[in-house]
Each structure stands twice: as C-alpha cells, then as structure tokens.
Image (tube, helix red, strand yellow):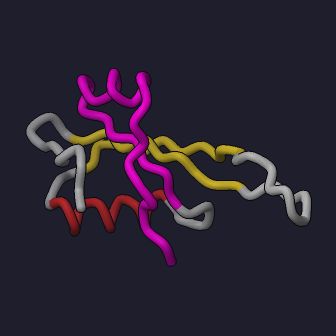
C-alpha cells in the first residue's frame, strides 16, 4: 500500500505548520492508524491526533471517472517536528 504521496504545501498548510500540524496527500485506502504508525516510525515523532478528509481530483479525460485521494492533517506533540521537505 502506498504511504503518503507528498506533503501538501498551500497557504493553509503553511499556517498549520505554526501549530505543529503537517498536511499530506495519501492513498485513499490508507487508515489513520496505518498513517500514525508509519509517521512515528519514519520520523521518530509522537502524534497527538490525525484529521482526514477525502479530496476530489480533477476529472480525467478518458473514462470520465473521478479518482479520489485523501488529505490527512497530522498534529504532533509539542516537542516534535518533521522536516518540511523530505527526499
């Protein structure tokens, strides 16, 4: 299963960084528990909470279908942080 696809950089997500919250695009089948375990293992941080929402992507010209993805906002405990750009 795909883990986070990328970090989302928008005006809102930059404002959320001040509150120690990080926004990611993830696979639509990824659960909050799987995301929490993955983030805690990879970045060695502790997560306080996760909010998720489904996001519609633009229509594809072929097959006329809408693909869906998820956006998750990760709230870390106060002493932890994640580097903004990870290769």
From the viewer's perspective, is 69 left or right of 26? right
- Locate residue 30, reporting x and y percent: 53, 65
Q: Is 47 colored magenta in this rendering?
A: no
Q: Is residue 14 above or below residue 57?
A: above
The number of numbered discs placed on residues in the rendered structure image is 0
Measuring from the top left, give residue 73's x and y in whole percent: 42, 41
Residue ranking furthest to the bottom: 1
Q: Return the residue found at the far front.
A: 61
Residue furthest right as drawn: 64
Q: Is residue 5 left or right of residue 18?
A: right
Outermost residue to the left: 79
Q: Position of residue 85 (x, y in %)?
A: 24, 49
Give the residue at x 90% y 58%.
64
Instruction: Determine whether 80 is above or below 41 in the image.
Output: above
Residue 10 sits in quarter: top left
* Position of the C terminus by quadrant: bottom left
Q: Residue at x 33, y 21 (%)?
A: 15
Compared with 75, 61 (above or below) is: below
Magenta-highlighted residues: 1-26
Q: Residue at x 33, y 40 (%)?
A: 22
**Residue 4 position within the rendered picture, expressed as x and y whole percent measured from the top left:** 42, 61
Residue 8: name its quadrant: top left
**15 in the magenta segment:** yes
């Amino acid at each position: 299963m795909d883990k986070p696809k990328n970090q989302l950089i928008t005006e809102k997500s930059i404002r959320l960084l001040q509150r120690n919250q990080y926004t990611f695009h993830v696979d639509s089948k990824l659960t909050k528990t799987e995301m929490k375990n993955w983030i805690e293992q990879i970045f060695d941080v502790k997560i306080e909470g996760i909010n998720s929402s489904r996001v519609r992507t633009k229509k594809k010209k072929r097959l006329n279908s809408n693909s869906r993805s998820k956006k998750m906002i990760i709230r870390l405990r106060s002493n932890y942080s994640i580097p903004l750009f990870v290769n």
